[in-house]
Amino acid sequence: MSETADLLAEARRAAGISQDELARRAGTSRTTLSAYEHGRKSPTIDTASRLLGEIDLVLTYRHRIDAVEHVTPRGRPFTTLSHLPRLPLDVAFATVTLPPHLNWSDPDQRFDLADRGDRALVYEIVLSEGVADDIQTYVDGALLVDLWPDLVLPRGIREAWTPIIEADRAGPSHAGVASH
């Protein structure tokens, strides 16, 4: 199945409505909706948007975020991302306990991401020790840009992240354009 088919089927099921009901609301046939959901037919963006709109969802786009693996001059691996992730506000400002692979020295320590000092510490740890999933779980791009001048990071890690930060500061049309 295609990503679009999976998205439409999952969204409809999550809304708790039948194909018949969604097709009726969107002014299409159940047969056509079924073809979209099973990947036999591809809806236009306008059609997919209309279908999702009928269940109070909006179709949006975001940059695909790719992981870029690096090695410090001392041989330590670390990861950057092609684009800065954005987190929902409740996640970006949550209280978190980092997993042991990130915070092995105090695995029960709680960090309040609403507190700038705690957030800076978490971002330093995650950018230095984390993999792509960790970065996308704990680091909000806009908050990272704001904290960037204050973060204490090893030189190689700072140098690898700087073009990504600068591209984000340049605005949406330049985000992620930096070469790695």
Image (tube, grey):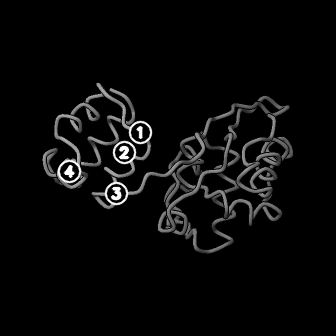
Judged by depth in the image, the label closer to the viewer, 1 or 4, is 1
In primary-sequence order, the first of circles 3 and 2 is 2
| CA–CA distance in space, label 3 to label 2 | 10 Å
Q: From the viewer's perspective, is residue 21 above or below residue 111? A: above
| CA–CA distance in space, label 1 to label 4 | 17 Å
Q: Are marks 1 and 4 in contact (CB under 8 Å)?
A: no
In primary-sequence order, the first of circles 2 and 4 is 4
**Which structural element holds mark 1?**
loop
**Which structural element holds mark 3?**
helix
Q: Amino acid at mark 4?
A: Leu
Q: Residue at x 31, y 50 (%)?
A: 51
Residue 146 placement, left or right of 93 = right
| CA–CA distance in space, label 3 to label 1 | 14 Å
Q: Residue 47 has which mark? A: 2
Judged by depth in the image, the label closer to the viewer, 3 or 2, is 2
In primary-sequence order, the first of circles 3 and 1 is 1
Residue 94 placement, left or right of 158 = left
Between 73 and 5, the one lying in front of the other is 5
Q: Amino acid at mark 3?
A: Gly
Q: Which residue is mark 3?
A: 53
Q: Which residue is mark 1?
A: 44
Residue 8 placement, left or right of 110 = left
Q: Residue at x 86, y 46 (%)?
A: 155
Q: Residue 146 has which mark? A: none
| CA–CA distance in space, label 3 to label 4 | 10 Å
| CA–CA distance in space, label 2 to label 4 | 12 Å
In primary-sequence order, the first of circles 3 and 4 is 4
Q: Position of residue 91 (x, y in %)?
A: 49, 63
| CA–CA distance in space, label 1 to label 2 | 5 Å
Q: Position of residue 79 (x, y in %)?
A: 68, 38
